[in-house]
Image (tube, rainbow, N blue to C red):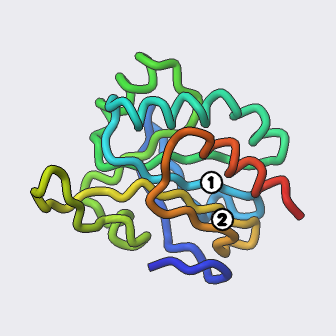
Amino acid sequence: MPEVGRPAPALDLPTDGGGRVSLAALKGRPVVVYFYPKADTPGCTNEGKDFSALLDDFAALDATVVAVSKDPVKKLDRFKAKHDLKVVLASDEDGAACEAWGVWVQKRLYGREYMGIERATFLVGPDGNIVRAWRNVRVPGHAEAVLAALKAP
């Protein structure tokens, strides 16, 4: 489980558009890594739209926003195009990153228990350490809160 003040777990994943994203390549810049359960569901779509709407503000602070799910790249490509998302969408099909970041958790819905991705966001500083973590995220206002944390001294 990643902790504030400690090095962020490794992240090196394929992305929408046939690219790759890695924390190692982004070292020296702040990175927002957010995990979401499933592409093209209402909460995940709204979260992607919210971060996309603020992407210029994040970029002005030299920050990259990376959204991670277990969806395959082809589904991420469709998701991004359908909703005109601007953030980097990364695919963790085997779940290794979700495990390393501690977001693959037991969930409960209508009395049924299952394993799934906890909606969580991590702000990684330019030094590669976790600056802030948000767990069990509620989408409304969250992207704004992350941006405010990035702007804070």
Q: Residue 140 at what x, y percent from top left?
A: 55, 39
Q: Position of residue 19 (x, y in %)?
A: 48, 40
Quadrant in which the C terminus appears: bottom right
Identify the residue shown where x is 43% and y is 34%: 16
Kindly identify the residue that appears in the image at 67 percent across and 47 percent down: 64
Q: Residues within 10 Å of mark 1 (few under 14, many from 20)?
A: many
Q: What amino acid is found at the position of numbered circle 2 in the picture?
A: Val
The residue that mark 2 highlights is 124
- Measured from the top left, where is residue 42 in percent x and y? 37, 30
Q: What residue is rendered at 56% in x and 62% in y?
A: 134
- The tag earlier along the polypeptide, 1 or 2, is 1
Question: Which residue is at the far front?
Answer: 111
User: How far is disc 1 from disc 2 in space, using C-alphas?
Assistant: 6 Å
Disc 1 designates what residue?
A: 32
Q: Is residue 28 left or right of residue 128?
A: right
> Which kind of residue does numbered mark 1 sit on?
Val
Name the residue at 49% across, 63% down: 135
Q: Quadrant of residue 15?
A: top left
In this rendering, the answer to whether 58 lies above or below 13 is above
User: Does 26 sit left or right of 37 as displayed?
Assistant: right
Q: Are the residues tagged 1 and 2 within 8 Å (C-beta)? A: yes
Q: Secondary structure at mark 2?
A: strand
**In the rendered view of the protein, which quadrant contains the N terminus?**
bottom left
Please tell me in which quadrant of the rendered image residue 94 appears. bottom left
Answer above or below: position of 153 versus 143. Answer: below
**Residue 127 is drawn in which quadrant?**
bottom right
Q: Residues within 10 Å of mark 2 (few under 14, many from 20)?
A: many
Q: Position of residue 152 (x, y in %)?
A: 85, 59
Comparing 74 with 143, the one in front is: 143
